Amino acid sequence: MEIKNYKKRIADSKIEHFLKLFGAISIEGPKYCGKTWAGRYHSNSEILLQKTTGGKSNNVELAKISPSLILEGTKPRLIDEWQEATNLWDEIRIDVDRTGLKGQYILTGSSTPNRKGIAHSGAGRYGKIHLRTMSLFESGDSSGDISLEQLCNNKLQGKLTGEVDLRQLAHLIIRGGWPANINYSSRDASEAVEEYINLIIDDDLNRLDGIKRDKHKVRLLLKSLARNESTTVSNMTLKKDINEIDNEDIDIDTLASYLNALDRLFLLDNDEPFSTNIRSSIRVKQSEKRHFADPSIACSLLNIKDESKLINDLETFGFLFEALVERDLKIYADSFNAKYYHYQDYQNREIDSIIELENGEWCAFEIKLGANQIEKAAQNLVSLKKQIESENGKEPSVLCVVCGLTNAAYKRPDGVYVVPITALKP
């Protein structure tokens, strides 16, 4: 469908590819990240299943009573928020089997549905795509001078990329990558994200599975997650944090169930640990690194609404900058079918980001806000690589420091690449 002012997404090429491979595709991701617009861009007809404020939708009822009517329309047909009528999953699978045609349906959903009543996984019929908020390249805030894919294949050519302003970096973190907020000021964007969080707490969490959750404790958990953004804290640590900072207590099982609900709404985007292809004697911790779907969520929960507040707290700035970079690296890596992880071992050695290529090679990235941190980060990467080599493990093929405040992309004498986040693209 023709959409005025549609901003191209990196995932567009994957959507087009999957429409040629599968009879239907499912685009998942947090609300407000642009799923519906992406689906519309690639479809020729649509039907929307969103429930109204009163909780009713004629289209939802129609989908349950007469699903064949919902499927009528020029293909590819977009079915938005399909999880409101989960019976459509099997109906579409049956139709795809009947026709044998590819690219028939595009489903979009902002929560993981209850699989009850779904008879088949859809394997071979459905392709799934996870859509995140916009990267800096998609929003026009990265020059795209440096390709991550080429970098991961050791093909970087040095280049001056221009000066980077600290205040602008702070703005990009506070604003986030929500398509509708791209032209907002930091304060306006923060207010929009605050309302977004309120709606999730007040409405979406209850509608997810009909379970009523303590809104106050959900908010405390979200604030604790914001305080622990870009860390590997355990659920027990989150519980203690809530008790120590907010003088409240929450049962550990309740906390886990709340985290599961937030994950089902795609509000969380944690990094999996690198299950080591290193194949050395180094014991690797199996802890996920905590992230929201977008760093702006943490900013809003921490009441950071303007650049000065972030600049005056460089420690928090560093964690949130790391979240921004890792969001973008995930988006870029996914475009060339690479896997994304983090690394931490029991000797507390860490690598912020790991990208594993399809051929089994892996690349190690450290993320630093200031150029004055590049030297130490590079030494850390080189040291860990040497230790892996000494233990006959599979060493990284690329070492790189992704920096905020650097004006060039280059390769150091020790072999470590340095690139600014505001110059990266897939």
Image (cartoon, grey):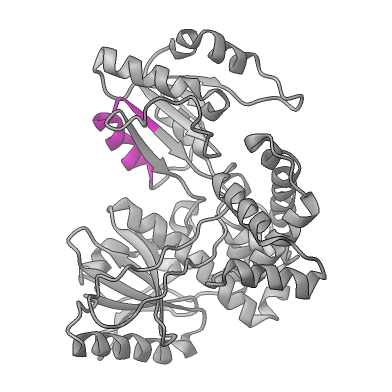
Please say whether residue 300 is visible from this viewpoint.
no
Q: Which quarter of the rendered picture does the C terminus lie within? A: bottom left
Please say whether residue 422 is visible from this viewpoint.
yes
Q: Is residue 192 above or below residue 98?
A: below
Q: Is residue 302 above or below residue 18?
A: below
The segment highlighted magenta reads 11-25
The dominant secondary structure in magenta is helix
Across and down, in percent, residue 134 comes to: 50, 51
**Measuring 34% from the left and 16% from the top, which residue is drawn there?**
94
Would residue 360 be found to the left or right of residue 107 on screen?
left
**Measuring 32% from the left and 59% from the top, which residue is drawn there?**
339
Would residue 62 be found to the left or right of residue 362 on screen?
right
Across and down, in percent, residue 154 comes to: 20, 72
**Measuring 66% from the left and 25% from the top, which residue is drawn there?**
51
Viewer-proximal residue among 157 and 230: 230
Viewer-proximal residue among 76 and 207: 207
